[in-house]
Amino acid sequence: MIKYLIIDDEPLARAIVKEYLQPYSDFELLQECNDGFEGVKAIQHQNPDLIFLDIQMPKITGFEMLDLIEKLPAIIFTTAFDEYAMKAFDSNAIDYLLKPFSKERFDKAIQKWRLQKENSKQVESLREVFKNLLPQNDEQFRVVVKTGNQIRIISISEISCIEACDDYVKIHTDAEVFMKKKTMSFYESVLNEKEFVRVHRSFIINLSQIKRIELMEKESYCALLKSGVKIPLSKSGYTRLKDVLGI
Amino acid sequence: MRVTKSPGLFSSLLLLLTVTLLWSFLHAFGLYWSGLSWQFAIIDSAISNLLNVFVVFILFNALRFYQPTPKKLFYVFIWNIILAKAVTIIFSYLFEHLFTEIFIQEKALINSTLIFRVAYETFLLTSFSLFMYLWNNFKSQQESLMRKSALEKISKEAELYNLRQQLQPHFLFNSLNSISALAGSQPELARKMIQQLSDFLRGTLKNDEQQFATMTDELEQLRLYLEIEKVRFGHRMNTEIYCEYECLQMKLPSFILQPIVENAIKFGLYGSLGEVFIRIKILCKENYLHIQVQNPFDFLVAKTQKGTGFGLNSVQRRLFLLFSRNDLLKCEADEKEFTATIKIPQL
């Protein structure tokens, strides 16, 4: 049996997916999810083979939801939202259905997925797609993170610094630290360069959080943040910081 | 800068000088022609026209900043008489103190014709005032014409913008998707929704020309919109509309209501989980139409969503264009509720 989930905030939009899947006897619906929060839980607990995912949903978008999941299932996007560069999907092993879609188009998507099911490259290429997609998306006013069972939405202005940590980054706010599976260069390109500066190979800092810049040793500086943390500045990082601050 | 500016000033000064000299010449010639000595004619002309230049200058400055209504023109006339009288008095005073000895014969003439002098001065000043009045009127009319055409142009843009808003692809495609879903399971409902969507779209096309609509029309358009949204979100969206009876005939800019409600729905539904209550309250107070739209939202989500202006900028702009006021839209937010209020002055 192929286990699937439908994640969409409109009941009628879920109904049509169910209706189109009725003739497929080997498909089993695990759950219908109203939003990304339910989606994250359901994916983690029920391990679906395939999900049908809407993009614009309450509180967090479909993309943000996917960002919170470690092991991605196969995904077919169902959305009316073509503001995202949907073309990016064409070249990948993922399919998307633009609402309203026909039964024929839907069947084709299922067909395509069946053919590529064995190909485990899909998940990796999906990550690649996100890397290209998110910088174009102008919603980078926030970061959605998961801590334990909780999903948190952090406003960009709350972030004091971002620290590299193997495959992850640590996102520091005044009181907390969150882990996120992203790269430093991703944040470097996404965040406003007038507010955030890469001051070191392993650090991006929020300029408004800097208390002062101190001399550590001869010709080596560090930035003291309001939270009391000291961040080392590399030579090129120090130059970049001076450039942005205009000193 | 100076080089480009000075010719204008120079040429207007030249014009003033030419007109004054020409007028003075006519004045002197007139006196001489009527049988007076040319010395007297020149001095009379010089003194009175110098005074005239001075008074006209005062009038010019006064009327530049004060635009009398037609009713108040009478006062301007009175002022002109007073000024004419003053000019005449100063003239005779100057004449008496400076030239009495030279022009003994003419003194009697001057004293006996003072009343004509006042009349002449009044005529001159009134002509000038009238000219200024008409000129100012002409200019302000031209200005308001220009403003009007600018307003028309921008409101056209607003109209187009609104049309784009109405036909927001997101709304349209999701509605069509709902219809598609209903067509399979509940064809009757699908048909009804197609009807509603058509009516709504027709409504957005109909009001092309009109800038204002009655509350009744706007509510009808809003009802269609809400019916469609309820098919999509009926399971979690509730709306409540309260409208005072007297408000129904009041006028408001067409399509101003729907973007506000759309915004409330967007932030209400996408900013929170679970059931959402949208409250719309329409009241008339002191010659204003008050429209209040309230939606629940999550402060944090709203803060971090793109566009912190809550998508109401276009509404604000339109109100400004129509009423030249920036205080007609008010947004208030606390932790859980967002309230947008607009006031429409009833003209």
Image (spheres, rainbow, N blue to C red):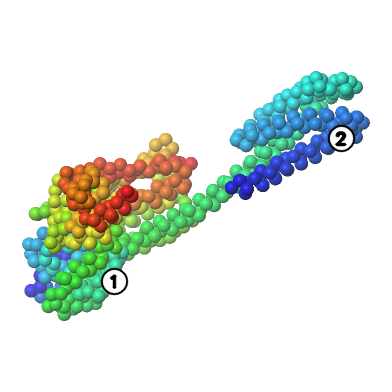
**Residue B38 at x, y = what percent?**
89, 32
Please, what is the three-letter code of the amino acid marked with disc 1?
Lys
Q: Secondary structure at mark 1?
A: helix
User: Could you tell me which residue is drawn at 74 percent across and 29 percent down?
Assistant: B51
Image-based side of A158 in relation to B37, left or right: left
Marks 2 and 1 sit apart, C-alpha to C-alpha, by 90 Å
User: Could you tell me which residue is drawn at 80 percent across and 19 percent down?
Assistant: B97
Q: Is residue B179 above or below residue B302?
A: below
Between A62 and A182, the one lying in front of the other is: A182
**Residue A44 at x, y = what percent?**
9, 62
Q: Quadrant of residue A17?
A: bottom left
Q: Secondary structure at mark 2?
A: helix
Between B179 and B28, the one lying in front of the other is: B28
Please, what is the three-letter code of the amino acid marked with disc 2?
Gly
Res. B122 visible in picture: no
Res. B7 visible in picture: yes
Q: Is residue A188 above or below residue A216?
A: below
Subunit ID for the residue under disc 1: A
**Residue A102 at x, y = what percent?**
26, 73
Subunit ID for the residue under disc 2: B
User: Could you tell me which residue is drawn at 74 percent across and 39 percent down?
Assistant: B17
**Residue B209 at x, y = what percent?**
49, 56
> Residue B64: which disc?
none
Between A93 and B105, the one lying in front of the other is: B105
User: Could you tell me which residue is drawn at 78 percent across and 22 percent down?
Assistant: B94
> Residue B30: which disc?
2
Q: Is residue B52 above or below residue B239?
A: above
Q: Residues within 10 Å of mark 1 (few under 14, many from 20)?
A: few
- The reply to whether label 2 and label 1 mark residues of one chain is no
The residue tagged 1 is A87
Image-based side of A44 in relation to B290, left or right: left
User: Are the residues at dot 2 and dot 1 in contact (C-beta closer than 8 Å)?
Assistant: no
